[in-house]
Image (tube, rainbow, N blue to C red):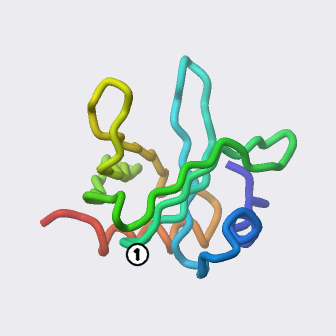
Amino acid sequence: MGLFLKEEDFCTYIQTNYPDINIEKGHTIVSVNVVNMQPIMSFAYITRELVIAAKYQRQLQIFTDHVIFRRDQLSGIEYIAKGMNAQLIIHTNEKLPNGMNAILTLNASTMTGNRWHKENLKKMKYTFQQD
């Protein structure tokens, strides 16, 4: 994961697309999930009130394909420690075409070189980890 990824860039992306939302630093992580044998890097802004995630196109240095869930759409957020990684599972009330509720799963490494990511992930651990 590159050392040049900046939390501010994602916050700016959110503010540009949702000027009515007040975004604060300290709630963003980088997630890498494997889909069809391809790693997909995403940024995610996560609070109890709001979750926004977007793919990060590293070659072009742009964000695409974002999803947003506001408080009334969220039914829960779980933090699960998995060795040197963490998994955040976002449960929503939004229905998929098959009738199931949408669930967003984000895999985040605790070993990334980005200090802001490590600090934010640690805060999320204490906020969302189940006892």
The quarter of the image holding the C terminus is bottom left
Camera-side residue: 53 or 97? 97
**Residue at left offset 61%, top offset 47%:** 42
Query: Residue 29 sits in which quadrant?
Result: bottom right
Give the vertical position of 123 relative to 55 (above or below): below
Secondary structure under badge 1? helix
Q: Which residue is mark 1?
A: 123
User: What's the residue type where badge 1 is placed?
Assistant: Lys
Give the vertical position of 98 relative to 67 (above or below): above
Q: Residues within 10 Å of mark 1 (few under 14, many from 20)?
A: some
Q: Position of residue 122 (x, y in %)?
A: 41, 71
**Residue at left offset 60%, top offset 81%:** 22
Query: Residue 123 sits in which quadrant?
Result: bottom left
Q: Residue furthest left?
A: 131
Left or right of residue 18: residue 52: left
Give the vertical position of 42 relative to 124 (above or below): above
**Residue at left offset 30%, top offset 53%:** 81
Q: Position of residue 49 (x, y in %)?
A: 40, 72
Camera-side residue: 120 or 93? 93
Across the whole image, how many numbered discs are drawn on residues? 1
Camera-side residue: 128 or 91? 91
**Residue at left offset 72%, top offset 44%:** 64
Q: Position of residue 55 (x, y in %)?
A: 65, 44
Query: Residue 6 sits in which quadrant?
Result: bottom right
Left or right of residue 67: residue 77: left
Q: Position of residue 37 (x, y in %)?
A: 56, 18
Q: Residue furthest right?
A: 60
